[in-house]
Amino acid sequence: MDEEIKKLIEENLALTKEIHQILKKVHRHFIWQRVIGFIYLLLIVGPVILAVIYLPPIIGPMIQQYQDLLGGMSAQPSQPSGEINLKNLEQWGGLLQELQKSGGSTAPR
C-alpha cells in the first residue's frame, strides 16, 4: 500500500509539473495577446487622432479653393434644401414677366 501511494504521489507531481508548464505558456500567450492588441489599437486609433488634429488646417484651403471653383460655375445649389429664397423667387418672377412682355413663350419646347 505504501508503494502504491508513493507511485500515485509521483504521478500526481509529474502531472502537476506538466500542468504548470502549460499554464506558463498560456499566461505568456495572454501577455503577448495584450501587447499585440495595444499595438493594433495604436495603429488604428493613432492615425485617426493625428488626422483629426493635423488635416483640417492642411485641407481647409484646398476645400475653399474647390468650393470657389464650384461656386463660380453655378449660382444654384445642386440639390435644393427645401427652403424658399424670396430673392430668387422675385428674380425669377421678374424674368418671367420680361419674357412674357417681349412675346416669348414660357412653355417648354
Image (tube, rainbow, N blue to C red):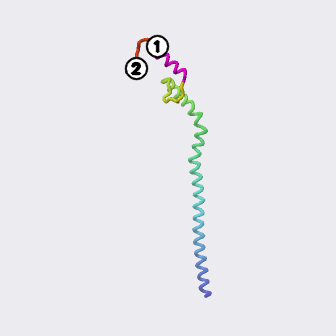
Residue at 59% across / 39% down in the picture? 52
- 76 and 95: which one is in front? 95
What kind of residue is marked 1?
Answer: Glu
22 versus 36 height, above or below: below
Residue 2, horizontal then vertical, whole percent: 62, 87
Residue 43, horizontal then vertical, whole percent: 56, 48
Residue at 48% across / 24% down in the picture? 74
Q: Which residue is mark 1?
A: 98
Q: Quadrant of the C terminus?
A: top left
CB under 8 Å between callouts 1 and 2? no
Q: Is residue 87 magenta?
A: yes
The residue positioned farthest toward the left in the image shown: 109
Q: Which residue is mark 2?
A: 107
Q: Earlier in the sequence, mark 1 or mark 2?
A: 1
Q: Quadrant of the N terminus?
A: bottom right
Tell me the crowding category of disc 1: few under 14, some 14 to 19, or many 20 or more residues within 10 angstroms, Cα based.
few
Dot 2 falls on a residue whose secondary structure is: loop
Residue at 39% across / 21% down in the picture? 108
39 versus 29 height, above or below: above
When asked about the image quadrant of residue 26, the answer is bottom right
Residue 95, horizontal then vertical, whole percent: 47, 16
41 versus 68 height, above or below: below
What kind of residue is marked 2?
Answer: Ala
Relative to 104, 19 lies left or right: right
Task: Label the magenta part by its dominant secondary structure.
Answer: helix
Q: CA distance from mark 1 to mark 2?
A: 14 Å
Q: Which portion, as a residue range, is magenta? A: 85-98
Residue 3, horizontal then vertical, whole percent: 60, 86
